[in-house]
Amino acid sequence: MRKMDWRAKIGADILQQLDGKSRGRLSVIVQHDLGPTLPRRLQGLRIKKTMPCISAFSAELFANEIAFLAKNKDIRYISSNRPVSSGNNLTVRFS
């Protein structure tokens, strides 16, 4: 079985920031297979919110923390935590 490159688990926009040697924290969403309770090794991270219904959590992480997580076999994907808004304002009228 071939080992997956840890960089493949990170969104392209985050990789660009990592390659640019970002020094600040990045707001991310981490999808995982860790179960409902996060293990001790993650307790030092700056986790903002857990989302058990989608097996994920949001966090503010430094580049080295993102790389550390991506190398873990139980982490599925790390993406940017972007604002979400409605795209359409559709009104339907019935007569």
Image (spheres, rainbow, N blue to C red):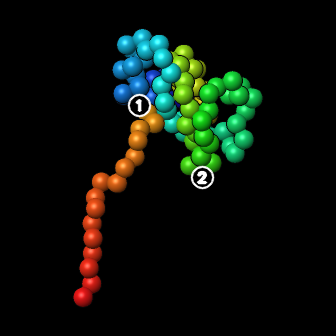
Query: In x, y percent, where is residue 48?
Result: 60, 36
Specify whether 55 is left or right of 4: right
In the image, 5 versus 10, the foreground residue is 10
Location of the N terminus by quadrant is top right
Q: Which residue is labeled 2 in the image? A: 53
Give the number of marks. 2
Q: Identify the residue under disc 1.
A: 11
Is residue 9 something one can see in this rendering?
A: no
The residue shown at (36%, 27%) is 13
What kind of residue is marked 2?
Answer: Cys
Q: Earlier in the sequence, mark 1 or mark 2?
A: 1
Q: Secondary structure at mark 1?
A: loop
Please determine whether, in this image, residue 50 is positioned above or below residue 90: above
Left/right of residue 35 with respect to residue 49 in the rendered view: right
Q: Amino acid at mark 1?
A: Gly
Could you classify mark 1 by the number of other residues whose Cα lies within 10 Å: few (under 14), some (14-19), or many (20 or more)? Answer: some
Q: Compared with residue 53, is residue 28 higher up or lower down, i.e. above or below?
A: above
**Within 10 Å of the Cα at label 2, are there few (<14), some (14-19), or many (20+) other Cα atoms?**
few
In this rendering, the answer to whether 10 lies above or below 92 is above
- Residue 53 appearing in the image: yes
Which residue is rendered at x = 71% and y = 28% of the image? 43
Residue 70 x, y percent position in the rendering: 54, 26
